[in-house]
Amino acid sequence: MARRSERTRRLAGLFLAARLLIPAGADTAPPPEELARMWAVPGLPEVEHIAWADLPAYRSRSSVIIRGVPGDSGHMHHPSIVYFDGRYLAAWNDGYRLEDRPGQRVRFATSADGLAWSAPQELSGRHPRRRYTTGGLWIRDGELYALAALRDARDIEPTGEDPLLFAYRWDRRTGRFGEGQVILREYFAQNVPQRAPDGDWLVLGKDGRSSWQTMKSAKGGVRALADWTVRDLPAAGPMEEAEWYALPNGHLVAHFRTRPLRRLLRSYSVDSGVTWTNPVVTDFPEAGARHHGLRLSNGLYALLVNPNTSGQRLPFSIALSRDGLRYDRIANVRADSPSGGHGNERPGYHYMRGFEHGGQLITIYSINQADIGVTLIPITEFEALYR
């Protein structure tokens, strides 16, 4: 216990003492102490004493896309969702039994209304010695691409082959994805590419060989699918699961998880993601999972997150912010203890993603790492928290 406490203190000191990596003459980022202030929900006790299940609940509708099959798709994780070509599309990866083992594949399904879903279809197929992990669904210049990373698997000798990031283009004529094209090597995307204010596509991730290494950005993707400049992000090791969004002033904010501290980390960029500040530890509680932040059409920022600092991925909550920096509202999407599973998964709601369409935020998540579920929330539910 003493060793863990000392490690936590060292990590906190490292990040809070961060220096800014901003070019001379550019707009400046907020000071670290301001970036660290992220949790501003009134009327709640200290985060370690919050009864998370008792938070207000958003009015919503939920459905299960697919249930895992033991021995075939017993572990289901990393879901993503989008609306394109008149339908919802969901993608995820599943494995025989456990996460990141050989044979893990990516599949997808479609839906007209976000609640009733087609049977799953293959995207990547299986590799006998490696694993595929979904990288999300990317709308680029009027085309849809499904991203999937191919990397070495756990519990087996490394192949010595490079990590690869594939893009599969959606074919409107056939209603399927085509063959995969390698768009990056030595890179694992941890969020879907988004347009930065300077027009480039920007995605954050890492090298793809193992966890807890240097985080990296990939910027470009405009002239060609495989045209990217990869740069190291400041700091390394204790952070992962990178995501970013743009603020109204054109600056960017990135958030990361760090398991030892149970708080989100935050970086800031004033130059469309070319350079970033060193991450600071914020006061926003997080279970050591994955989160997703996005700006809604009504101007609010929504942060999909597991806020329980005990490490449980329960509940699944959405926090709200009016400026993208301070989150001052929060309510639950799913706080019930989910049933199901095959005895080797982690209980809870995992790795949530959201996409807004038709006046709703449709969210997708893994249930107990055994099934894939969706919840549709009217946008008016978020506005109601400010009345």
Image (spheres, rainbow, N blue to C red):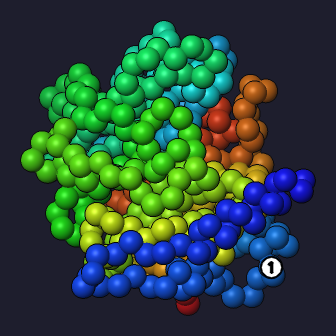
Q: Pointer 1: what residue?
A: 46
Left or right of 124, for residue 66: right
Q: Residue at x 37, y 38 (%)?
A: 187
Name which residue lies at 45% across and 35% down.
208
The amino acid type found where label 1 is placed reads Glu
- Which of 139 and 109 lies nearest the eye of the viewer? 139
Q: How many marks?
A: 1
Instruction: Pick whichever, 157 or 71, lies toward us.
Output: 157
The residue sitting at 65% across, 32% down in the picture is 370
Outermost top residue: 128
- Where residue 2 appears, x then y in whole percent? 89, 56
- Residue 234 in sight: yes
Helix or strand or loop: what does disc 1 sit on?
A: loop
Label 1: how many residues lie within 10 Å, few (<14), some (14-19) or many (20+)?
Answer: few
Measuring from the top left, give residue 108's x and y in whole percent. 40, 31
**Residue 99 occupies which quadrant of the picture?**
top right
Residue at screen point 19% across, 38% down: 226
Residue lying at the far right of the rendered structure: 1
Looking at the rendering, in which quadrant would you find the C terminus? bottom right
**Please, is residue 60 above or below residue 221 in the view?**
below
Q: Position of residue 47 (x, y in %)?
A: 77, 74
Q: Is residue 341 left or right of residue 302?
A: right
Residue 214 horizontal side relative to residue 333, left or right:
left
The front one of 334 and 267 is 267
Q: Position of residue 20 (x, y in %)?
A: 43, 75
Q: What is the quadrant of residue 265 in the picture? A: bottom right
